[in-house]
Amino acid sequence: MRDKIKKWLEPRIGLEEIVRTQFREYKTPKGANFWSTLGFVTLVAILIQVITGILLMLYYIPHPSLAFDSVQNITNGIPFGWLVRLTHNIGSNLVVATAMLHLVHVFFRGAFKRPRELTWLTGAVMFILLLSSCISGQLLPWNQAGYWSTTVISSMPSFLPVVGDSIAAFIRGGDTVTALTLGRFFAFHVVILPFFLLFCLALHIFFIRRQGLSPSPEQVPQVLPMAEFHQEQHPDGLPCFPNFSMKRLFMVFLYCATVSLILTFSPNLFMPEGTNLLANPVNTPGLIKPPWYFLAQYQMVKSIPNEFVGIGFQVLVLVVFLFFPFFDAGETERSIKKRPALMTTVIGLLILWAALTLWGMR
Amino acid sequence: MERRSVLKTTIALLGTTTLLSLGYPVLRFLSPTVRRQSGEKITIRKEEIPPGSARELVFEGTPILVINRRETGFIALSRICTHLGCLVGYDKYKGQLVCPCHAGVFDLDGQMIAGPGSAPLRQFFLTVSATHVTLG
């Protein structure tokens, strides 16, 4: 049967050639390790989010008077609804963690350097879109935690002078979080953000396949002059399939195992207090905290007395993060290890981020 | 047995187990959760439906008609047309049930007389006492 299908497809799409050129002859750079699979793991994690999200959408009703009950019904009434909801909830946190690790690995590998500026840019934009998806998804269950977290996050732009209030009102569709906000966030979460995410993902993969995977800084220590387009072939590397694919598969299983482990032993790990309470617009709960990946920003805004300075600093970090390969274009050294100033700054920022996150947790 | 075939069989077994353990919850998740209510009872006073008239009701989640036929007495029929699911209406002048979508016509026993489709309308059990008609 399999042979018959292959035989039928071969003259139509040239299956053999695709498998040969895209898998067997497609080489991964020497020294590509488990860290190098994190991009693929993030892709699979996003796919899991898409599938569980579509399943949840079958029963979810985006209306303030029905949203909470529909989510409770998914969790308690629909067969295995708890599994789908928790997988989506835990996955939304782990996908951010894998994306962060992927970005850090890419940075330390010097894979953002010329000619891969656009690969970095599309990846960084995808990361921002991923975080935005997480924020917009928080409001959908219409519970106390999501409602007030959205109120706080959507108020942040109002610290910006002149245009701040207009931006906040535009995000919320009014002065406060209402049914209009829910409609907007639902549209953002299920249509608008996934559309841009998919677009950036397609570009990101296109750049990676077109340019070839980035070699390690040990192999190519200096940025090569760019006279013309050059595709990295890695003749001394190992074939992507089956060698590197097995590493990828292992890491995907590790990711799924982590989700299952949290699901089994700590299912409410990412469910903040107030998750199972209906949103009450006239009663702010005692302690409102954003998810762990925003705790550093939250703590910074809380600690710096001038909100504008706090937000301004974060906007600056965001711009530097997005366009770093362009700011760093003059430097030809690819290895971060040989650039102590940059290495110290980045490690310092990572430690600061971790410290602020831990501080925010307390 | 060769090492390669052991590996292949193991992977196939593990893959099937994984697929089944993921597929089963998804299938259960997708299966409709609204079940038809059973054990429902509706009682109507006979004088509410004089001979030659009908009354529209919803019974066990299905729109139905309780008709008091002049010669043969009460009958409860589903209003869902067996052609494409539109709701039939009672034409008291012609003593027929007519579907507005594709002009299907049923007699008062629920049998198809004209138009597309062939199956008769679903009939519901009812009991008739001296003063009441009871569905279910």
Image (cartoon, coloured by chain):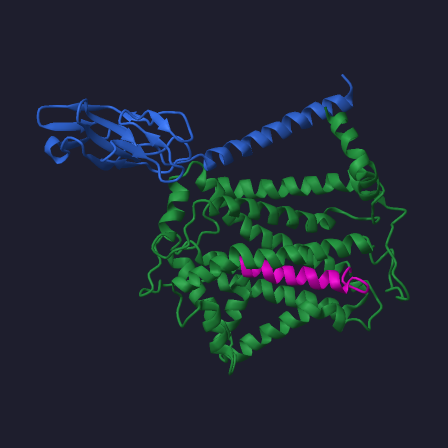
Chain colours: A green, B blue
Seen in the picture, residue A73 relative to A179 is either above or below; the reply is above
Residue A7 image-quadrant placement:
top right
Judged by its main secondary structure, the magenta piece is helix
Q: Which residues are magenta?
A: A111-134
Residue B23, how many percent across, how many down? 54, 33
Residue at screen point 41% across, 39% down: A78
Q: Residue furthest top?
A: B1
Residue at screen point 38% across, 41% down: A76
Task: Please tell me whether residue A113 belongs to the stretch shown in magenta.
Answer: yes
Residue at screen point 60% across, 54% down: A97
Seen in the picture, residue A113 relative to A15 is either above or below; the reply is below
Residue B112, how many percent across, how many down? 35, 26
Label count reads 0
Task: Please tell me whether residue A132 belongs to the stretch shown in magenta.
Answer: yes
The quadrant of the picture occupied by the N terminus of chain A is top right
Residue at screen point 72% across, 48% down: A37
Q: Nearer the viewer, residue A86 or B131?
A: B131
Q: Nearer the viewer, residue A82 or B90?
A: B90
Relative side of B9 to A275, left or right: right
Relative side of B24 to A320, left or right: left
Q: Residue furthest bottom?
A: A162
Residue A237, how many percent across, how many down? 86, 46
Residue A347, how many percent across, how many down? 68, 65
